[in-house]
Amino acid sequence: MVVVMTAEAGDTEVDGVVDKVRAAGGDAFVSRGMSRTIVGLVGNVDHLETLNLRGMPGVSDVMRISAPYKLVSREHHRERSVIRVGGVPIGPDTLTVIAGPCAVETAEQTLAAAVMARAAGASLLRGGAYKPRTSPYSFQGMGEDGLRIMAEVRDKFGMRIVTEAVDNESLDLVEQYADQEPMFGIEQEYTFIKDGRPLGWPLSGYPAPQGPYYCGVGGDKMPGREIVEQHTVACMKAGLGIEGTNAEVMMGQWEFQIGVLSPLDVSDHLWVARWLLFRIAEDFGVFATLEPKPIMGDWNGAGAHTNFSTKAMREDGGWDAIIAGCEAIGKRIDEHIAVYGVGIETRLTGAHETAHYTKFSYGTSDRGASIRIPWAVAKAKKGWLEDRRPNANMDPYKVTGVLVETVCGDAASD
């Protein structure tokens, strides 16, 4: 049964209906729309009809509905619903494509299906790890191995997973593999070069020591700002997820940030943003380099600090997941350093706000650590971690891939 309130009905009238229904042994659920409020009733309908709800103040109509699921009926929820799966909307005014194999059988099959699905515009990858059959001799699905394959493909392509749990026993495993939602934000540093030296540097000798350039202002010490601003506008017009820019520690060195996006999306956006930077710099007779240590000596290098989180890290109580992620990364130092960019040994020396590339550490607000946990994250006990080791010239597809493999793989195995 549904009670439709008048447009003028306020909280007093709505509460009156709710209280009367509950006093009679039923229950009531209020749904407030843009112009009307609807109260869905649950209980003995024949008994509720004796309450004379139509005569109560603020009531426009009372309807008896035969739908067995009243709380999700159109009569109870007049507004059209939008369901989000990892940020992907399903509902009115959107066309959401879900594609993938009926049953996950091999990693190669699922990977090929994901390639075709994404090329066709799919944003959700479906696949069955559990396939109950009448005959016990028929293929019953790969179970956890199938979930693991789907998780690997999901992390590679940044597509959310749609799969099924067929019983209570499989529910925990499905949730474990299908719901980590890795997200990234990358801080891309770079250096403008003109006539073989960083932009703004004197033809011989050096500029003033580092200090006033970081996030600084002033035309005499902030060369390249016009290029930076044109690049920012170009990224915005291109629909890239650019979040900001700032001058960096060394004169002629700048940074832009891309994110927060899925692994594949942040990599795609960063790649295009780099191309735009190089192309716009051409018009100014300047070369933008991603060299990790363009000037040797007492000058900062250029990195691509990579901010990373999973759903568990972002939720309340996510601190334990953040620490677990740091610990997992610390067990695979060599595997990460191998894909963090060419020339990493010239930049990660233990000086200039870096940890040595052969060592691993993490800490709160520690710019000299391998992984920095921002102060705000430590205070909130949830959020993200910042891997400060990747070089400016790193391959984002490899960096996001190894972080997901290490952290999500470790979480899935717990």
Image (cartoon, rainbow, N blue to C red):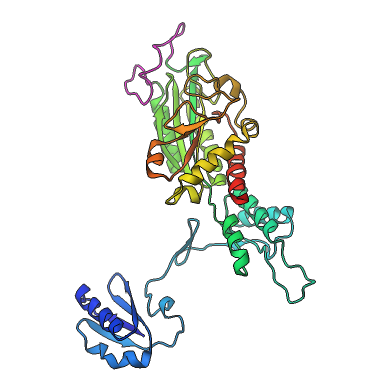
Q: Is residue 203 magenta?
A: yes
- Looking at the rendered image, the quarter that the N terminus falls into is bottom left
Q: Is residue 61 visible?
A: yes
Residue at point 63%, 35% (across, down): 332
Q: Nearer the viewer, residue 34 or 310?
A: 310
Residue 407 shown left or right of residue 313 in the figure: right
Q: Position of residue 322 (x, y in %)?
A: 49, 43
Q: Position of residue 79 (x, y in %)?
A: 37, 72
Of helix, strand and loop, which mostly describes the magenta segment? loop
Residue 359 shown left or right of residue 381 in the figure: right
Q: Position of residue 76 (x, y in %)?
A: 37, 78
Q: Position of residue 357 (x, y in %)?
A: 58, 25
Q: For residue 13, which quarter of the picture?
A: bottom left
Q: Nearer the viewer, residue 240 or 256?
A: 256
Q: Is residue 182 magenta?
A: no
Number of marks in the rendered image: 0
Residues in magenta, as a range: 201-222
Q: Nearer the viewer, residue 207 or 76?
A: 76
Residue at point 73%, 67% (across, down): 140
356 w.r.t. 79: above or below: above
Residue at point 42%, 68% (across, down): 81
Residue 383 shown left or right of residue 131 in the figure: left
